Amino acid sequence: IRDETVLVTGGAGFIGSHLVEALAPHNEVRVLDNFSSGERSRLPADVTVVDGDIRDPIALQQAARGVDIIFHHAAVVSVSQSVDAPRGSNETNLDASLLVLEQARQEDARVVVASSAAVYGHPSELPVPETASTDPTSPYGVQKLALDQYTRLYEELYDLPTVALRYFNVYGLRQQGPYSGVISTFLEQARADEPITVEGDGQQTRDFVHVSDIVRANLRAATTDDVGDAYNIGTGSRTSINELAELIRDVTDSSSPIVHHESRPGDIRHSGADLSRTTRTLGFEPRVSLECGIRSLVDGT
Ligand code: UD2
């Protein structure tokens, strides 16, 4: 997209900052971030930064004034934090998300929201299509599901162009912190020649999607005529945690042993996206294979 005025909530975070980087050369970009996990150093100099919280209607209003599109990526992303404190994460992930949708209504702006494979809980079929039953296993998943449904409703009720993107397991540069995902954990362990810690038997599988593909999906969502719907964003292929551990050890030339720990209580056994609707309607296809994605991570690109 070009020559649009856009707002990226959570624009200093992991996914948000990659999106900002892609948008900034051709658009007027604003970022609303409370810098709880985001970092200012990630942002290009020419973006307008509002240092504020999406729970604050004034900050939101200021950031969203006159925008054409809102990419809503601000969230409390830790599933375990949502289990420990459901109300706290609900305030950001759902209540404040509704403020974002309301603000979009005021501005008559398109909204693209970050939804999640967490809406499916233990998927009822594999690969899982968007029409599968939704049965989240955490407050985080419930919050993302409600947001996903509100997003659809805002199109139905108020004719607002909205799109929900259900991300599978996203990885890439700048994914860090205590809740960073298995790829960055394994990579750190492999680089330090420390044991790679597989939880459980390692035969559980995930659909790992590179952050650059997530950015491309967002750009598609910014222009699609097929609004008011949710789309799976993954690669459509699954990798076991054992395979991942071996791949990371190979790519890094590490001598780390692979060790097995207790499995995570309530862990999802298998997760993988059916991309039929996404490719047919959104015209999105992933480009980065897991091996290429991990190689580029290792190279720091
Ligand atoms: C992902 C999302 C989460 C939510 C959820 C929905 C990430 C980071 N999180 O959680 O936001 O959408 O999907 O289902 O993408 N593991 C190990 N060793 C480690 C760390 C993890 O074996 O040191 C295993 C873990 O037990 C799990 C798998 O790796 O089986 C993936 O774990 P994760 O935390 O990267 O992501 P996940 O799928 O739990």
Image: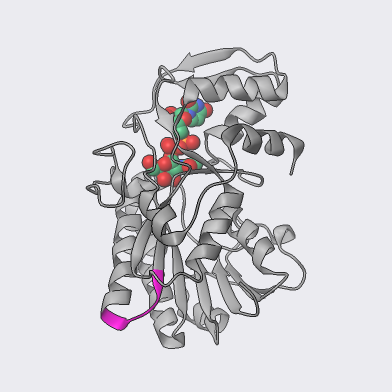
The residue nearer to you, when weighing 52 against 47, is 47
Magenta region includes residue 160: yes
- Whether residue 1 is visible here, answered yes or no, is yes
Q: Is residue 149 above or below residue 292?
A: below
Task: Count up the numbered dots.
Answer: 0
Q: Position of residue 27 (x, y in %)?
A: 66, 75
The residue nearer to you, when weighing 192 against 183, is 183
Q: Position of residue 87 (x, y in %)?
A: 33, 57
Q: Position of residue 73 (x, y in %)?
A: 50, 61
Tell me the residue at 46%/69% (across/down). 224
The residue nearer to you, when weighing 100 against 294, is 294
The residue nearer to you, when weighing 109 against 195, is 109
Query: Can you say which quadrant of the picture contains the N terminus?
Result: bottom right
Q: Which residues are magenta?
A: 157-162
Q: Is residue 42 left or right of residue 140?
A: right
- Whether residue 80 is visible here, answered yes or no, is no
Query: Can you say which quadrant of the picture contains the C terminus?
Result: top right
